[in-house]
Amino acid sequence: MNKNEKFVITLNRELGSGGRTVGRKLAEKLNVKYYDKALIEGLTKEFGLTVDEIEKIKAQKKSWWNEFNNYYKKRNSTTLPMEAETVLTTESMMATEKRILQTLAEEESCVVAGRSGFLVFRDWPNHMNILIQASLKKRIERVMERQHLSREEAEAVIEKVDKGRETFIQKYADTSRYDARNYDLVINMDTLTEDDATDIILAYIERSR
């Protein structure tokens, strides 16, 4: 991936791995926008967007980019709970979110965090797919701390989200989100801080140019 040209970095991550924080830090270091599924789902609801509506706006050359940026500033998705990314239940919603993400990526470089990113951009020019993982023990501890849950509650949340995300991927692609062949880089966070992981990704980007 060439960071001197327009690019997209997708970050698939396990709940409780710290991947969301890594994504935000990476976007800040690269000075590009950071998008996740919770934010995009909120955008579709806020503006009532569909694939047809997006194409109509683009055809009329109306700019919803400024509107989106205003919305982006108002709603900081990092304040949402880590399990806020629910499973998409309709193909129309999937298609809409895919079109939104691709439209945003056409505008400028970005980091996209979410379970479908590597699918949305798998044929995109100048992109990189990354998977952020951690052991179940570390994930449970992080979810307990961040969401103020008991160990049993944290385990239940992780199990539910893991199952939902894997079901989602298998529904829309003949693959698994755990298949390392879908990614350019896989990082285990057990002995790393979010800053460590961010530095590893930046170094990898420099080497892959």
Image (cartoon, grey):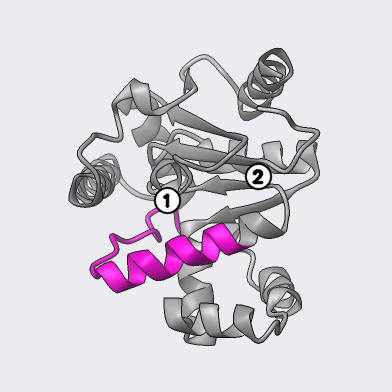
Asked whether the residues under the numbered discs 1 and 2 touch, taking CB atoms below 8 Å apart as contact, a structural biologist would say: no
Q: Nearer the viewer, residue 148 or 157?
A: 157
Amino acid at dot 1: His
Crowding near the residue tagged with mark 2, few <14, some 14–19, many ≥20 C-alpha atoms within 10 Å: many
Element marked by disc 2: helix
Left or right position of 94 against 39: left
Crowding near the residue tagged with mark 1, few <14, some 14–19, many ≥20 C-alpha atoms within 10 Å: few
Q: Is residue 37 above or below residue 157?
A: below
Q: Quadrant of the C terminus?
A: top right
* Disc marking residue 24: 2
Q: Nearer the viewer, residue 104 or 125?
A: 125
The magenta stretch is 80-103
Amino acid at dot 2: Arg
Left or right position of 115 against 53: left
Visible residue check, residue 55: yes
Q: Is residue 131 above or below residue 125?
A: above
Find residue 8 and report its horizontal and vertical position in percent: 61, 42
Image mark count: 2
* Disc marking residue 28: none
| Res 81 → quadrant | bottom left
First in sequence, mark 1 or 2: give its number.
Answer: 2
Residue at 70%, 12% in the rendered image: 207
* Residue 64 magenta: no
Q: Nearer the viewer, residue 63 or 129?
A: 63
Visible residue check, residue 188: no
Find residue 12 and report its horizontal and vertical position in percent: 44, 38
Residue at 46%, 58% in the rendered image: 37
- Of labels 1 and 2, the one closer to you: 2
Find residue 121 and report its horizontal and vertical position in percent: 48, 45
Q: Quadrant of the N terminus?
A: top right
Q: Which residue is mark 1?
A: 148
